[in-house]
Image (cartoon, rainbow, N blue to C red):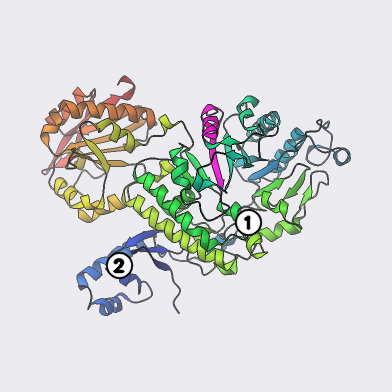
Amino acid sequence: MNEVRIHRFEIEGRRFAIDVETCFCFECDGISWDVLEHYPHTPVNRIYALLRARYPETELREVVGELEWLRASKSILPPRKLDDQYKALELRGGLAKIAVSLPRESAPAIPMKRGFLGRGAAAAKESAPSAIDLVRDAVTMLLGRAEGQRDLEVEFHEANRVWDPAAIVSGAAHAIKAIRSAGKNPKVSLRVSEMPVESLPESLEGHTFGVRLELKTEDIPASALEALSGSAPLSLARIRKIFAAGEDHFSGKIVLRPNHPGFGDAVRILESMHFGAIEIDVDEAYIANPSLGPREMLPAMAQCAEDYAESLLSHRYFRVDPIASVFWRIYNGTVTPRIDPTGTQALAVDGNGRIYPSEHFRRVDGFALGSFAGGVLDNAILRRFEDVGSATTPACMKCWARNLCGGGVAAVHQALSGDFRAPHPDWCDAQRDWFGVAVSAFNRLSAAGINFTRVYHSIDRPAKRQVSWFTLARAAFRMNIGMRPLAEADAEMLTSWESWNRSAYFLSNERSVFVSNQYDRELDALHPRPLEFESVLIHKDGKPFGLFKVRPDRLPGVADGYLYFHEPAAYASDAVRRSFRMVLKEAGAEQSIKSLVVPAAPWEAGLHEFLESAGFAREGIQREALYTGAKYHDLIVFRLTLDTL
């Protein structure tokens, strides 16, 4: 039987294909679906013969040609090299993260002495470590085992509430300074689990909530965390206010651990409460409640993914994990043979200084690695975690989702199957279905031109600043005109607009010649160029009348802009001119654009007047920068400093 290198699947009547190795995915029409049943293991002439009765050979050749182009670009079916297979098995060395659970009752700091990790073993046995001593030891171990890792994280773990804000703040300050002094990039976070939360919406009752804070600086006052230190239950609205009040010191994420399958409305409800960063911790749900059935949890996760996609399509940008992380891997085609750093790049320390492969393995007998007091780690246990991941797990090696899943989380496998290297079959089946749902939801975003780079890197900010470029444009133009991203259906219109059009919008490109056809424009819509924003300008009735495009220049803070109105009367419209200035003003604040450069051909007098009336100044002339009509022509360059708007 032929090995499946391109996996096909259907979700609610829509058909998709994904390359098992590169994770490149795309939606299929009927002919592509049938061709992929035979491609690539069947010779193309044989494919034509098998499908000639159903499709014209010219269309079959076109589909095969597109697949061959994707193959040539190594988007699908990359050639397999022995070195690549070895690299997949290589373990990237170095500790990158350590989770620290501080003692509830802090002992006095122990005087610094010679010994393992900064303190003498004898002194450690006499007294439990203080919070600051524990942090010192943890950071010393992190730096000592980091090897080539550049980005190091210390994550403090608390249960129910923040028990000692001063200890967290002082520990965070020490960690940031020590890591930075070692020439590394520090990151310090605080996770508070199993918080008592009151006044929950009915559909969220029975679930467990927590928060995760990413601390921004080393000089955070303890008062910034005191609102989370009380024993009284908090409401979700109160937690959101705490996030807003502490925005100068930390970014906050609300964490929901499902305790039953009824959490499908979680994303919709939490978004309505203006949480900008949300986590649905399904892994922790299985670890805490192994009796939960993965198949029963899938519909709720699918609903969360659909609700998240709908929000992004409506240009309400925020982040929901693990959905955003899966979308990000699909977006980049990121191959992930191992997703869980447990025991290799991540370790955990409890309040008594005992060390474990991860926070979750504190609850499992037989996984204690040692302690700071003892000064020795059990490397035999650590070596067992070197084989975690899809590249070395037999159950994963033939799974089509292996490079998206990365083998799953070791603690989940330990909870469900009793062996951290043996995924439970029901969990695997549900994971495959979940990734199919994620691919389907993401393709809706891709077709709509959503800039997912911006979504993925967003953090929790006040609602007034949670606004996308698309939203800015829509708000500015709402009284006069509208904007929307390119759609695949625009290809024919765009091709007709561009045909023999002498506007700088079309001619001012890398070659200064016409290069687009309808197929190119379809690809532009389906696969937008990274960091480039191109939109269609529309009237209130939805009729397109122009194009606007922005892309970053090589110089920081500078962007290249391109403007074209298919209706010449728009250049003289005061309403369009005012709206255009509003868009540029907001874009300057939101996108860190300080200067916008727009080219215009000498014969585009309407564009010249429009730009000058909008505040642009003639910057200069690029001599013989355009070639059209068998002649070279100058290009006039206009510049606007957005601070002047």
Mark 1 lies on residue = 289
Who's the residue at 87% across and 41% down the image? 125
* Residue placed under numbered mark 2 in the picture: 32
Q: Residues within 10 Å of mark 1 (few under 14, many from 20)?
A: some
Is the residue 229 above or below the residue 348 in the image?
A: above
- As for residue 253 lying within the magenta part, the answer is yes
Residue at 39% x, 49% y: name it.
309
Amino acid type at circle 1 is Asn
Q: Position of residue 23 (x, y in %)?
A: 44, 59
Per the model, the C-alpha gap separating discs 1 and 2 is 43 Å
Q: Which residues are magenta?
A: 237-260
Query: Where residue 130 appears, x then y in whole percent?
Result: 78, 34
Front-most of residues 160 and 617: 160
Is residue 618 visible to us here? yes
Q: Residue drawn at (49%, 65%), measured in percent from left and top?
A: 81
Quarter of the image that includes the C terminus: top left
SS of the residue under disc 2:
helix
Vertical comparison of 627 with 329: above or below: above
Q: Residues within 10 Å of mark 2 (few under 14, many from 20)?
A: many
Q: Quadrant of the N terminus?
A: bottom left
